[in-house]
Image (tube, rainbow, N blue to C red):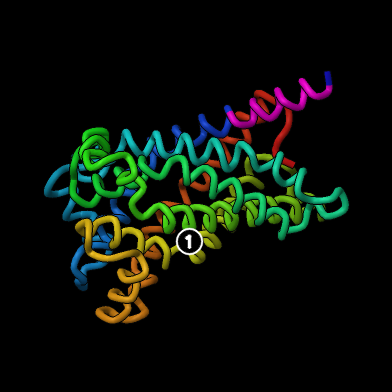
Amino acid sequence: MAARTEAWRRNANIGASCLTGSAVIALTNPLDCLKSRYQVAPQSGGGVAAFARALVAGDGLWRGLWRPGLATNVCACTISVGTRIGLYPTLRDSLAPAEARRSPLFMYASGLAGGALGYSVAAPFFYATRVAHVRDLGPGLATLRRLAAPGAPALWRGAPLLVARGAVMSGTQLATYDSAKGFAVDRGLLDDGPVLHCAASLCASVALTTAMVPLDVTLTHYQASPPGAGGAAACARGLLAARGPRVFVRGWLPLWARFLPSTVLTFLIYEQARKLLLGDFLR
């Protein structure tokens, strides 16, 4: 009976996480699209706000920022969030001995492992999304079919870099969020509830953006380049030679603008869904 209860809790947590991933990306896909398109655009002095205004003025909000890659992005984030957050409590509690369960090291390792698995499975959907974003190719499902034309392995182009990016993002986000929550609760600073969830999410969004922006810049340029243009490492070297080290933080602000609301929404929705299904918040 105990095993059945534990299995049910694990599956319910995965279900809450899948719901979270699909809901959040449906709302934040315009920010994801803006970030990708800005990263590959020629450098200019206008900044990201001017770039966004020009896109919306030219194509409208729906066609310019919301529709591109929407369907494949929803699929990708349902899979990746459902895996990395859905398995996080199980991995954390299995990897860490009882006395070290609140250790940031084990939190990071658990988020890293779940992120690597989730992004490995979702890689084709993320690839199609990124191509649809930068080339304005519609919701992304037709892009997915076109990219698969040379054979299914083609859908995993750039997957090692994507998985590394996703694993770093997952480990950093979950470890920072869980640690910030535990710190506040243990010291009586805030009760475990929506206010604390928002505060911990803010901390997590800053940490994960800083950790992953160099990988994100490289991945965007690599997957937007024509096939046969060289590997991801060659792409990074080319960017460094052509544009200097600052290119690897280009897009930090739109990336954070994308991750701040998505991280807050992710944990608000997840914690409430978990409370509804399991009767408690993540602890």
Residue 219: x %, y % from top left: 35, 60
Q: In this rendering, is residue 187 above or below 269?
A: below
Q: Bounds of the magenta span?
A: 2-14
Q: Is residue 265 visible?
A: no
Residue 215: x %, y % from top left: 42, 64
* Front residue of this view, candidates 44 and 223: 223
Q: Is residue 119 left or right of residue 1?
A: left
Give the quadrant of the C terminus.
top right
Residue at 52%, 59% (x, y): give it. Answer: 208
Residue at 16%, 55% (x, y): give it. Answer: 54
Task: State yes or no: residue 9 in magenta.
Answer: yes
Residue 164: x %, y % from top left: 49, 58
Residue 92: x %, y % from top left: 72, 46
The amino acid on which the numbered mark 1 sits, given as a three-letter code, is: Thr
Farthest residue, direction left? 58
Q: Is residue 256 visible?
A: yes
- Rate crowding at label 1 as few (under 14), some (14 to 19) or many (20 or more) other CA atoms within 10 Å: many
* Front residue of this view, candidates 180 and 242: 242
Residue at 65%, 56% (x, y): give it. Answer: 108
Q: Is residue 8 left or right of residue 207?
A: right
Q: Is residue 160 left or right of residue 55?
A: right
Q: In this rendering, is residue 57 above or below 89?
A: below
Q: Which residue is mark 1?
A: 209
Q: Secondary structure at mark 1?
A: helix
Residue 216 placement: quadrant? bottom left
* Front residue of this view, candidates 64 and 212: 212
Farthest residue, direction top? 1
Task: State yes or no: residue 125 in magenta.
Answer: no
